[in-house]
Amino acid sequence: EVTKKQVDEHTVSSLQPRYVSIPTIGVSQTRTFAMGVTASNILASPVNISDAAWYDKSDTPGSGGVILINAHNGGIRRDGVFSLLGTLEVGDIIEVERGDGEKFRYEVRENQSMHLDEVNNGGMRMMMTSAEEGKEALNLITCDGKWVPRLNQFDRRIMLRATLID
């Protein structure tokens, strides 16, 4: 578990995402850490299932571009911060707070569960674009589906795209 003190003391540079909040599913001030990709060219995930990872090659809130954040759906003993991401509906609100304290609100435009094959064959390219051309985007990813031991991962991903509203 992440303590309130750890949340309060979490810092990032001024323009980077510091926290993600999704009131509809009870996610509040989830710490967000800058991360890249693994040696296998897969988005790196946070170590703690209570944290999120901002893809450091994506844009930052307020830049007008596409922000990409991923987090775990669960762990061995409890749910991860994005365990209910697949339940979000068009119109739900997601808030991102930057390191400088400025907050940005995004409205869900689409949310789908996509098979890993689809993710690898165009889905990730889609996640680097906005659901509405010309609008700043916040796109969120988490695992979904069934665990595939031979792949050491889940066979689906929740692919959520939202756009800036204020």
Image (cartoon, helix red, strand yellow):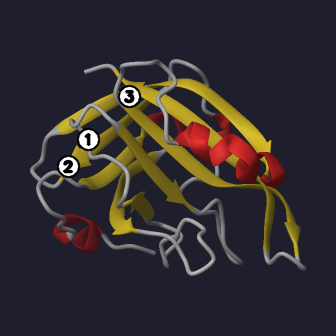
Q: Position of residue 30 (x, y in %)?
A: 38, 57
Residue flagged by tag 1: what amino acid is it?
A: Pro
Nearer to me, 144 or 64:
64
Nearer to me, 114 or 101:
114
Give the alpha-carbon distance from disc 1 to disc 2, as whole Å: 7 Å
Splitting the image into 4 quarters, where does residue 2 fall? bottom left
**What residue is rendered at 53% in x and 32% in y?**
161
**What residue is rendered at 57% in x and 81% in y?**
39
Disc 1 versus disc 2: nearer the observer: 1
Label 3–label 2 contact, CB within 8 A: no
Q: Is residue 83 left or right of residue 57?
A: right
Label 1–label 2 contact, CB within 8 A: yes
Q: Which of the labelled discs sits on residue 106, or is there none? A: 3
Disc 3 versus disc 1: nearer the observer: 1
Nearer to me, 103 or 157:
157
Residue on which disc 1 sits: 61
**What residue is rendered at 27% in x and 66% in y?**
7
Vertical placement of 5 versus 20: above or below? below
Give the alpha-carbon distance from disc 3 to disc 2, as whole Å: 14 Å
Mark sitting earlier along the chain (3/1): 1
Q: Position of residue 88 (x, y in %)?
A: 60, 32
**What residue is rendered at 35% in x and 61% in y?**
56
Q: Secondary structure at mark 3?
A: strand
Vertical placement of 124 versus 150: above or below? above
Residue on which disc 2 sits: 98
Q: Is residue 104 left or right of residue 152?
A: left
Give the alpha-carbon distance from disc 3 to disc 1, as whole Å: 10 Å
